[in-house]
Amino acid sequence: MAVIFSNFSIITTALLFRIVLKRHLNWIQWASLLILFLSIVALTSGTETSQHNLAGHGFHHDAFFSPSNSCLLFRSECSGKDNCTAKEWTFSEAQWNTTARVFSHIRLGLGHVLIIVQCFISSMANIYNEKILKEGNQLTESIFVQNSKLYFFGILFNGLTLGLQSSNRDQVKNCGFFYGHNAFSVALIFVTAFQGLSVAFILKFLDNMFHVLMAQVTTVVITTVSVLVFDFRPSLEFFIEAPSVLLSIFIYNASKPQGLEYAPRQERIRDLSGSLWERSSGDGEELERLTKPKSDIESDEDAF
């Protein structure tokens, strides 16, 4: 059941894509998204039931990190005290049970409801991100400047969370900012940064639906690579459901309206340098520079 709700972001993204961004989806595309949703649910649930338990590699941060004397003293003092944990940031048990009791009369747990809320929040964040990346004069602004503005707020709010929690402040003060990290976690930071840049490029120059569809292709690719790398043995259903995922994505893209009935609205924007840009309001907004700086040869020809 949790797998079904976790993949519900396919449907929520399509709904918000139509409501917020006013993008048109025909009935064939809606049907292909529904088939994609059901196929990816069957695919992910099948891989979870047939996967084998793999032993961990056994890496520990002590092999890459040598704590200082102040850090060792801090950890030894904190291990036997209750005030080292941030209890003010946890939910009280009585309040949590009261909240869960509201959903006790239905067959869905609180976790399922929170997964649905998370799907709407993540989909709305991506939709709104695409909206601000393409709205008005933002379309001609550099994507790197836009990313710098976006991640500034991320650093600000995460820094506040780190600074307001006393246990985190003490740990950073005594053990350093990268305590508990190793080479793999640091590499993960760069991989996540690259992923964020790629998503920003997709949202600015393509759209959210392309992002969602490629995420489902990634699921098929990861499962296929697991067969080669982790000795994963997929069931027979995988060889039926994986082509269904790829086929539904193909049908979605092949059924995009091409006629005059769905001709996208064109909008022209002039940036600060005086160059004129053209923007389409259809699926996957495209930019085209209408005025280009003339070369020396063209200038000489215009003189005659």
Image (cartoon, rainbow, N blue to C red):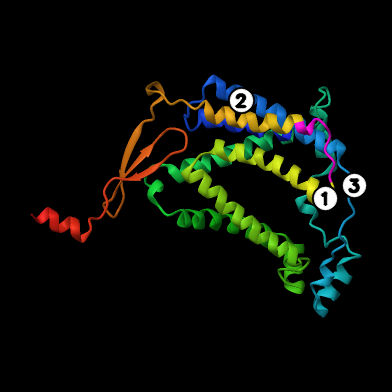
Question: Residue drawn 69% across and 59% down?
Answer: 188
What's the CA distance linking mark 2 and mark 3?
34 Å
**Which residue type does callout 1 highlight?**
Phe
Dominant SS type (magenta): loop
**Label 1 vs 3, first from the N-terminus:** 3
Q: Which residue is mark 3?
A: 53
* Residue 141 in view in this figure: yes
**Label 1 vs 2, first from the N-terminus:** 2
Question: Residue drawn 56% across and 48% down?
Answer: 199
Question: Residue drawn 85% across and 70% down?
Answer: 75
**Which residue type does callout 2 highlight?**
Ser
Circle 3 sits in a helix, a strand or a loop, which is it? loop
What's the CA distance linking mark 1 and mark 2?
31 Å
Q: Which residue is mark 1?
A: 230
Q: Position of residue 9 (x, y in %)?
A: 65, 34
What's the CA distance linking mark 1 and mark 3?
10 Å
Give the side of residue 48 with respect to residue 218, left or right. right
* Residue 8 in view in this figure: no
Q: Which residue is mark 2?
A: 32
Q: Which residue is more in the foreground, 19 or 202? A: 202
**Label 2 vs 3, first from the N-terminus:** 2
Q: Position of residue 228 (x, y in %)?
A: 79, 49
Q: Which residues are magenta?
A: 232-239
Circle 2 packing at 10 Å, graded few (<14), some (14-19), many (20+), is many
Check if residue 237 falls in the magenta segment.
yes
Circle 2 sits in a helix, a strand or a loop, which is it? helix
In the rendered image, which quarter contains the C terminus?
bottom left
Q: Which residue is more in the foreground, 100 or 189? A: 189
Residue at far left of view: 304
